[in-house]
Amino acid sequence: MQSTQGSPLAMDPIDLLTKLVSIRSLSAQEGPIADFLQSWLRDHGVSARRIDDNVVVEVVGDAPGPTFLLNSHLDTVGAVAGWESDPWSPFIDADGRLVGLGSGDAKASVAAMACAAVATQRAGLTRGKLMFVASVMEEVGRGGMDVIRPLLGPIDAGMVGEPTSLQAATAQAGLIVLECTAHGKASHAARAHLGVNALTVAARDLLRLAEWRFERVHPAMGPTTVNATVIKGGERHNVIPDRCEFTLDVRTTSAYEPEEVVALLQAKLESQISVRSQRLKAVETPADGALLRALSAAYPADLGPLVCFGSPTMSDWAHLRDMEGVKFGPGDSPRSHTANESVSVAQVRAAVEIYAGCARRYLEGC
Ligand SMILES: [Zn+2]
């Protein structure tokens, strides 16, 4: 990457990140931050179009070739309790960390990707196309990348910017949400022998689930897990309830298709299962593919070897299943959605070079 330090168009990802954090951008309220990012890109010589409040940049090379996507999200969750400073007044602390809501998840990635897109445009590309998409509604899982993916055309490989401490998430768990209904037979509690208590039916199922293990274990992701997370049933103290409903949260790996998971659980449970959501499938990328080769080659030696891992958290990667993908970015995942969220300034700076270098190697080198 060409250095622009000191030039009139110098760009500092930390300046950009500071501005991004200072603009509130809850899901569905990304208009102001999208306006700002679009004009920041324009001021740095890169034109960006909008699809609603998604900001889309294309840097087109001299010759045709593959398309490489950098994608991260503009929205944040709300501020939780416990902030010791104003969440939207970012500052850099004594440890060299920029503190603010969304600093790591995922504005650090947005800032680094925007700078990588500018650097790529300035240096030029001999072939292929770099696309940068700053998308909306990631935190609510619907209405952002899932909607605009078909409008972006064919893409060969993509990096999803999320806090991974500059390590490569090469697999990501999927999510299935199941609504279960235990059926019984109502009766007066004084004549309980005439009824069937739906709470007891549900309780038997919950105990079965506590013991249940999925046989096939993914080498990077570990086992598929199932947890009951919500339960409701019964109306009055003197009525044996005929219905009890509970919700299961299933974190899947590519060891099972969603339909298999549902069939296995239905065979195990007395309660009736209905699928609320199974569209967020597990994803993974080949270890010997062109994307990971490009990322390894772009990875600076002073950061040590590139570590690959399986990530339990959801991201927009779930909507990019039709390409080689990896989740990678500055910041630490456990700090996401917590008070006093922060990101290492050094990691954000390193990410600019890694994003730009990986894209260039992938587009020009394969
Ligand atoms: Zn995120």
Image (cartoon, rainbow, N blue to C red):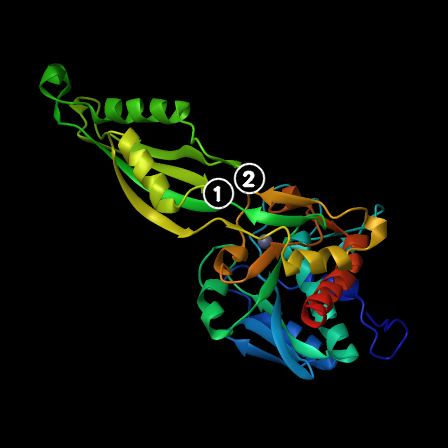
Q: Is residue 104 left or right of residue 80?
A: right
Which is nearer the eye, 336 or 320? 320
Image location of residue 89, percent across then percent down: 71, 57
User: As drawn, is 308 to the left or to the right of 138?
Assistant: right
Q: Is residue 165 above or below residue 147?
A: above
Expressed as whole percent of the image width and height from the top left, the position of residue 180 reads: 29, 37
Tell me how far mark 1 sits from mark 2, CA to CA: 7 Å
Quarter of the picture containing the N terminus is bottom right
Q: Is mark 2 within 8 Å of ligand 1?
A: no
Residue 18: which disc? none
What residue type is disc 2 on? Met
Residue under the image location 17 percent in, 21 percent down: 238
- Residue at the farthest right position: 6
The mark found on residue 253 in the picture is 1
Q: Is residue 358 visible?
A: yes
| Left or right of 6 in this view: 206 | left
Q: Is residue 132 visible?
A: no
x and y percentages locating residue 309 in the rendered image: 64, 43
Q: Secondary structure at mark 2?
A: loop
What is the secondary structure assignment of the residue under circle 1? Answer: loop
Label 1, residues with CA under 10 Å away: few <14, some 14-19, many ≥20: many
Give the vertical position of 363 relative to 221 (above or below).
below
Question: Where, quadrant-wise, is the C terminus in this rendering?
Answer: bottom right
- Which numbered circle lies on residue 221? 2
In the rendered image of this protein, does residue 352 appear above or below residue 154?
above
Q: Residues within 10 Å of mark 2 (few under 14, many from 20)?
A: many
Tally of numbered discs = 2
Q: Earlier along the polypeptide chain: callout 1 or callout 2?
A: 2
Q: Amino acid at mark 1?
A: Thr
Q: Quadrant of residue 351?
A: bottom right
* Residue contact between numbered discs 1 and 2, judged by CB atoms under 8 Å: yes
- Vertical relation: 287 (above or below) 39: above
